[in-house]
Amino acid sequence: MGAFGDFSSICRKAPIPLCASVGPITSVASGVGIEPDCYARNIEVANTIIFQSAASVMHIVALIMTVVMLLHVRGKFTAVGRKEITTFFYLYMILTFLSLCIDAGVIPPHSGSYPYFVAVQAGLASALVTCLVINGFVGFQLYEDGTPLSLWMLRLSSFIAFVISFLVSLATFKSWSGLGPTNTVGIFIVLYLLNAIQLALYVVSQIILVTRTLQDRWPLGDIAFGLFFFIAGQVLLYAFSSRICEGVSHYIDGLFFATTCNLLAVMMVYKYWDSITKEDLEFSVGTRMNNWEVKELLPQGPEEDRRATVYADPIYEGHHYAPGPGTGSGASASGYEGGHHRRESHGYTPSPHRQSLRY
């Protein structure tokens, strides 16, 4: 068992990206780096070698699922914490894309830019966890969600976490400020210890939120499943990766299961958020159809006001039209009959001027 913060035993069991930039200098590789005892085999596609092919496929699946979840979140226009949880999924999407590039070998491990990309990956991981914790406070309604105060507090907290983790990781890889590839206590604290504390704080706060403020207890199941998937992924990666790799002839390793379980945990975060937020359908328009509900019928006017004719005008009140002579049985000799007067029916008589015209 190694000392506190030592990655030697961790990197021999788990193929994590930062292992290529930590550890003592070896005479074989003429550089730092700890190689795992067993890792997934590479494949060649179009004269291109792809590392961690199974994990890379899961990264692509995670990107697709994140887009689907984002579309569902953006469709709930009036849900509480909509903008805040959207930031969380954007960070997860960026982290997944960068992890795809690193794990698949798009960025070679021995290139000069590799430590910088791994440091960015570590910073994004810390920012993602911090963003999740701040999202957990939104449900307590300590401040109005969606306001500049809420959004900027979320962004600044996530940015600070990113900067701290990025700088500590880069200082470890580049031997700055007393840190170095063999002195990895700093990166272990910011990347593992602090993130674990924040995740525990999020879980406890959400359990308190559900039990104290909600009548429905089903969201506790989402929290339990999310916690189970996350812990299972970490155990499979750091404890059983070598055994899995040897058991399946190097086709997959613990990184594949860790990527899958992390995706399932993030999906449980979405499911939990969706279960505790309600949407006001009266103001929800856009991608969803038929969200408007008719609360009350329009007031009805008099019967004659609904006639689609000009004869509903008051000037025609008290008059009715009777058929002229010869138009039917019982025809009246009068053209119009009213309650107080009678008008005689006369035929049309052309004017003298009209009679003088010849056709």
Image (cartoon, helix red, strand yellow):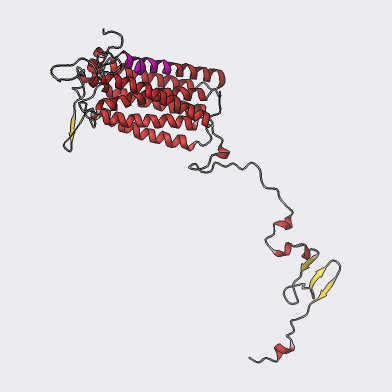
User: On screen, 89 above or below 357?
Assistant: above
For residue 190, what is the image quadrant? top left
- Locate residue 270 relative to residue 109 in the image: left or right: right
Across and down, in percent, residue 141 comes to: 56, 24
Q: Position of residue 104 (x, y in %)?
A: 24, 30
Residue sitting nearer the eye, 192 or 311? 192
User: Can you say which quadrant of the picture contains the C terminus?
Assistant: bottom right
Residue name at image x 54 percent, y 39 percent: 284
108 shown above or below 241:
below
Viewer can see residue 268: no
Residue sticking out furthest to the front: 177
Q: Is residue 132 visible?
A: yes
Q: Answer with left or right where residue 264 lies relative to residue 287.
A: left
Q: Nearer the viewer, residue 136 or 251?
A: 136
Is residue 32 inside the magenta stretch?
Answer: no
Q: Left or right of 211: which side holds 354?
A: right
Q: Which residues are magenta?
A: 185-200
- Decide which of 45, 150 is in the foreground and name it: 150
Figure check: 282 above or below 173:
below
Q: Name above or below for residue 140 compared with residue 61.
A: above
Q: Residue 86 at x, y = what percent?
A: 44, 32
Q: In the displayed structure, does residue 218 sit left or right of residue 174?
A: right
Q: Residue at x 71, y 90 (%)?
A: 355
Dominant secondary-structure state across the stretch colored magenta? helix
